[in-house]
Image: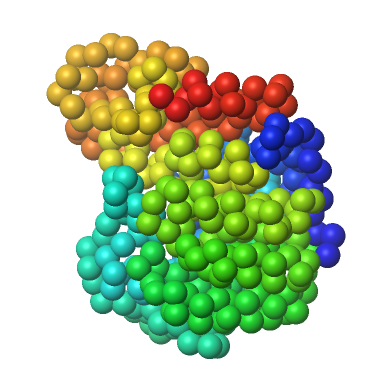
Amino acid sequence: MGKLKFEVKARDGKTRTGLLKLKHGTVNTPDLMPVATKATVKALNTDDLNKLGAQILICNTYHLMLQPNADIIEEIGGLHKFMNWNKPLVTDSGGFQAFSLGLGKEHAVGKIYFPDEGHSESKPKGKSIASVNEKGIRFRSIYDNSSQFLTPEKSIRVQEKLGADVMLVLDECTSPLSSKEYTANSLKRTHRWAKQCLELHETDQALAGIVQGGHWQDLREKSAKYLSSLDFDSYAIGGSLGKSKRDMHNVLDWVVPHLPEDKPRHLLGIGVVEDIFESVERGIDLFDCVSPTRVARSGYAYVRPPIGTKKNKYRFRFKSIKNRADDQPIDPNCKCKVCKNYSRAYIHHLLKTEELVGYNLLSFHNVHFMLELMREIRGAIETGTFQKLKKEWML
């Protein structure tokens, strides 16, 4: 289709660096996309993101088609102009909300469900406000309670109006608790939708296919092979990744060998430190994750080794009373503007008093942490020292 160009620059085992050339700029990979769900990365503006060196963002089609709506964004000049961002953008398809507003509510789980390892996103059990049939996804709007029906055609048309560099096909993100029978039926539907999206797509935007299949090897391999045969511009890996980190690693080991070598690979919704190292090691190029700003709003900062470890999830809890009079920076080993200029005591004060600038400063630091990690990973791959870097981090 020729809507993007991807060039592999260096390899270290299965890890690789690359140049992803898009309409609005070039992205050095591997990289993590800050999540701009509603056309903004929470607590940060585009000046912040440029200072952080963010290369590419991902926005949420479901939210933007409802508020303000795709027609308004198109009339203003597209998503880039609307949010004052002149670098590459990705839009999802709305398929994730089939899970988060549907079976995710019924099953009271998030996408990450690793109960034996303390990495589960538990949610209050609730009534589903989304349902899936062969033609599309029926939602109830979280904004005005109106009924919305998202089909492959509507998803594509909405994303074309938004104007991101890369669009994702409509799919169903299955629950970690879905049966194999349900997942297999869902996969057939997702494959039909993927082909429809490819046939309906009319603009110069790139289009990514999404590999589904839960944590079953035959389904994942079937999906990877089928979607690769359709010649999408890039490929994403979505849906449930099983019930353990080992399951997630297995999914990548099954899928990646069947994806084209000359196309970028995006692992959807994953972006914590240990998962990035394990996934890059298996050939993943792109990540997106809400965690950097989400944990900031809960009063946690990411910290590098030796303070940050796999055991504490590389997190430092700010609301602890011991930080009340601590004049150290968040992380003495961090060079971001927050660590250069503000103390733990000040951040603690801002969070305790719920001052909004506290969320900005902590979000800035956390996004810097992740983007700096990605820069270090790229450098290590290019110098053949990826395993050394991984060992230093995986304490």
- Give the total number of marks visible in the rendering: 0
* Residue that protrudes farthest toward the left in the picture: 321
Left or right placement of residue 106 versus residue 337 in this view: left
Asked if one can make out residue 293 in the rendered structure from this viewpoint, the answer is yes
- At which x and y percent is residue 106? 28, 73
Q: Nearer the viewer, residue 10 or 152?
A: 10
Q: Residue at x 41, y 36 (%)?
A: 363
Q: Is residue 228 left or right of residue 386?
A: right
Residue 311, image quadrant: top left
User: What x and y, as percent, mark residue 328?
Assistant: 32, 12
Q: Residue at x 38, y 56 (%)?
A: 243
Quarter of the picture containing the C terminus is: top left
The colour scheme used to paint the residues is rainbow
Quick one: 78 or 188, which is closer to the camera? Answer: 188
Q: Is residue 92 above or below residue 16?
A: below
51 up-or-down from 99: above or below: above
Q: Nearer the viewer, residue 336 or 78?
A: 336
Residue 21 seen from this side: no
Q: Is residue 63 above or below residue 29?
A: below
The residue most toward the front is: 218
| Quadrant the N terminus occupies | bottom right
Tell me if 205 is positioned left or right of 111 in this view: right
Q: What residue is rendered at 40% in x and 82% in y? A: 131
Give the image location of residue 292, x and y in percent: 42, 40
Image vertical order of residue 131 relative to residue 97, above or below: below
At 57% from the left and 21% from the top, the residue drawn is 388
Q: Quadrant of residue 300?
A: top left
Q: Is residue 175 left or right of residue 259?
A: left
Spot occupied by residue 242 in the image (x, y as percentages of width and height) = 42, 59
Most distant residue in the bottom direction: 134
